[in-house]
Image: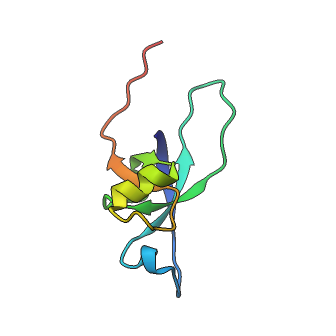
Amino acid sequence: MMLGKVVGTVVTTISHKDYKNRRLLVVQPLIVEGEKPDEDFIALDNTQAGIGDTVLVNREGNGARQALKNPDACVISVIVGIVDSVYIES
C-alpha cells in the first residue's frame, strides 16, 4: 500500500475487458522530505477518486485483484481509498 495524489486521467478508445466501466487515473506517489521521488503510474479507480485527491493505492497484483473481486484480472495497481488527511509526526 502507498499514498499518492491523483494528477490526471487516462482516456482509451479500446481497453482490456478487466478495465471496462472503470476509470484509469495517473497517480503521483507521495514521499516524505528527503526521499527520492518515484515515477507517476496508472491505477484503476475503485473509489470514485478525482484529480487532486490523496489516495491509498494497492500496488501488489494479488491484493489488487482481490480488491476488484476478480482473481484473473490483468491489473497491478488499484485505488482502494480516498484519504481525508495525512499527519506525519517528526
Judge whether residue 78 can be spotted in this image: yes
Q: How is the image coloured?
A: rainbow
State the residue lying farthest toward the right. Answer: 36
Of residues 8 and 80, the one drawn nearer to the viewer in this rendering: 80
Q: Residue at x 51, y 54 (%)?
A: 61
Residue 81's x, y, as percent? 33, 48
Q: Is residue 47 left or right of residue 26?
A: left
The number of discs equals 0
Q: Residue at x 35, y 51 (%)?
A: 80
Residue 15's x, y, as percent? 51, 81
Of residues 38 and 1, the one drawn nearer to the viewer in this rendering: 1
Residue 74's x, y, as percent? 51, 68
Q: Residue at x 44, y 74 (%)?
A: 19
State the residue lying farthest toward the front. Answer: 71
Above/below status of 80 relative to 73? above
State the residue lying farthest toward the top. Answer: 90
Q: Residue at x 33, y 34 (%)?
A: 85
* Occupied quadrant, residue 38: top right
Above/below status of 68 relative to 84? below
Judge whether residue 49 can be spotted in this image: no
* Occupied quadrant, residue 45: bottom left
Residue 71's x, y, as percent? 40, 63
